[in-house]
Image (cartoon, rainbow, N blue to C red):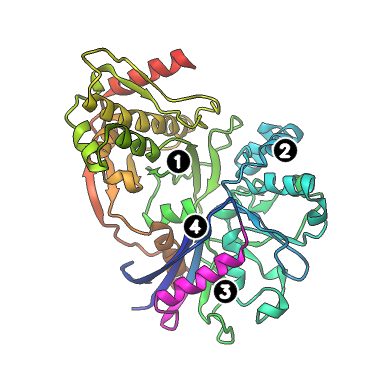
Amino acid sequence: MPLVAGVDSSTQSCKVVIVDADTGAVVRSGRASHPDGTEVNPAHWWTALKAAIDEAGGLADVAAISVGGQQHGMVLLDADGRVLRDALLWNDTRSAPEAAEIIEEFGAQFLATATGSVPVASFTSTKLRWVSNHEPHIAAQVAAVCLPHDWLTWRLAGYGPAEDSQYGPDLTALRTDASDASGTGYFDAAEFKYVDSILEFALGKVPVLPEVVSPGEFAHQPNPENRITTVGIAGGAGDNAAAGFGLGAKTGDVVVSLGTSGTVFAVSQAQTADPRGVIAGFSAVSFDSLPLVCTLNAARLLDSFSELLSVSHDELSALALTAKSGSDGVVLIPYFEGERTPNLPDAQGSLHGLTLATNTRSNLARAAIEGMLCGLADGLSALTLAGVDCKKVILVGGAAASKAVQTVAAEVFGVPIEVPAPGEYVAIGAARQAAWALSGRLPIWDVPTLAALDANPKPQVLASYKKVQENLF
């Protein structure tokens, strides 16, 4: 029974799971917090990773490890392997004007074809351009650019500044995988190579970049001399790709994640190239693609309506289930924070169809859930129109446990709904990648199910939503 370790270095914290490589069962785990903010010194991630490993019981009996991490974050290194400035994270939007500069320079069609995506402020390419524009003294010192999980993998392998590492600042030892590289805005997943022209424009030069490791391979082989860890280190992954891998998502599965924002992504054999910028053409942990659509409004809507109606989340769910499907014609347009899909940054949320008869607590509760999921259905529609197959929706996130959310999802999406049991699926996906590299074969692990619902399409719900949406926008 070999053990493998998986890491989820997210915006908020670092989670480590130690997993049975044969079954995927979690044996033990550890966690450490990250500081808040949209820019963070990577040293905090390294401290948290070591603390989480210690809390998980260490790696002495572990055979391999892999790091999943937040996508897009920009880590800049000088020639001595030192971090030049705090890492700008995915949620730092100051580089929105730079995203526009890149699109103006290359055109949306070229960028979508060359990199799979049209860049937005979260992408690494835009952050490099921002540094070039606003901190040229920093840009001039940049010798290498990597992402959060790349940097942590490098440190685990014993590299870093000479005074703080075993093997010193060998920048050529940086490694990544296609899933994380595909979120930079300067990687061509189809050709498995970086796009130098975009880097030249963004930073004014082509720095050292992490070597992209193929799926199922080690980034760093086991090393009995390494004082940090002697185990093999797999290539790592971006967080959405690692989560999909941990969930066992395959072609025909679409993952709908209900977090602060919402994501809709699928494992697909076909690559997308959307010049509108609605679909981000990322890569999966496997050799497949991972087309992804992001919405800005998801679980926070339920927080807001729970507060409005002075009920708990469980009570909101029960209240919603006492209303009829379609909420008696009450429709919520859920653009409380503007919206990205569709691209309506200045839009606001609104309620429609209220009469004295329909203005009830139960209709408001159900309309909130229907509006949230109809907004995510726009993301699913974008994927299916691009040729992505959808036979099942895997519903994840804290709100997925709601009975009303599950019921409405089966109505709005019109396909079977599967809700996995709560778990650290990014870290589990990283562990599965480590097991793959260790054994040379892709492990098949069972994913426990919390709920499963048959498709129960209610097209009038989505039709009412679309009618209001189209009249407004």
State the residue position of label 4.
10
Q: Which residue in the structure is indicated by mark 2?
A: 102
Q: Which residue is mark 1?
A: 261
Secondary structure state at the residue bearing disc 3: helix
Helix, strand or loop at mark 1: loop
> Which comes sooner in the sequence, label 3 or label 4?
4
SS type, badge 2: helix
Q: Seen in the image, is 140 located left or right of residue 259?
A: right
Position of 350 with respect to 155 (left or right) is left
On screen, residue 141 versus residue 157, left or right, reads: right
Q: Earlier in the sequence, mark 1 or mark 4?
A: 4
Label 2, label 3: how many angstroms apart (C-alpha)?
A: 34 Å
Between the residue at mark 1 and the residue at mark 4, the CA separation in whole angstroms equals 15 Å
**Range covered by the magenta-colored residues:** 40-64
Q: Nearer the viewer, mark 1 or mark 3?
A: 1
Structural distance between the alpha carbons of marks 2 and 1: 25 Å
| Sequence-first disc among 4 and 2 | 4
Q: Residues within 10 Å of mark 3 (few under 14, many from 20)?
A: many
Q: Marks 1 and 3, Cα distance to the nearest angstrom?
A: 31 Å
Precedes in sequence: disc 1 or disc 3: 3
- Proximity of marks 1 and 4: CB atoms separated by less than 8 Å: no
Q: Position of residue 352 (x, y in %)?
A: 35, 17
Bin the neighbour count of mark 2 within 10 Å (Cα to Cα): few under 14, some 14-19, many 20 and up: many
- Of the image marks 2 and 1, the number of the one nearer the N terminus: 2
Amino acid tagged 3: Leu
The x and y percentages for residue 391 are 33, 39
Residue 106 seen by the camera:
yes
Alpha carbon of mark 4 to alpha carbon of mark 2: how far? 27 Å
Cα–Cα span, label 3 and label 4: 17 Å
Q: Residue beneath label 3, please? A: 156
Can residue 57 be found in the magenta stretch? yes
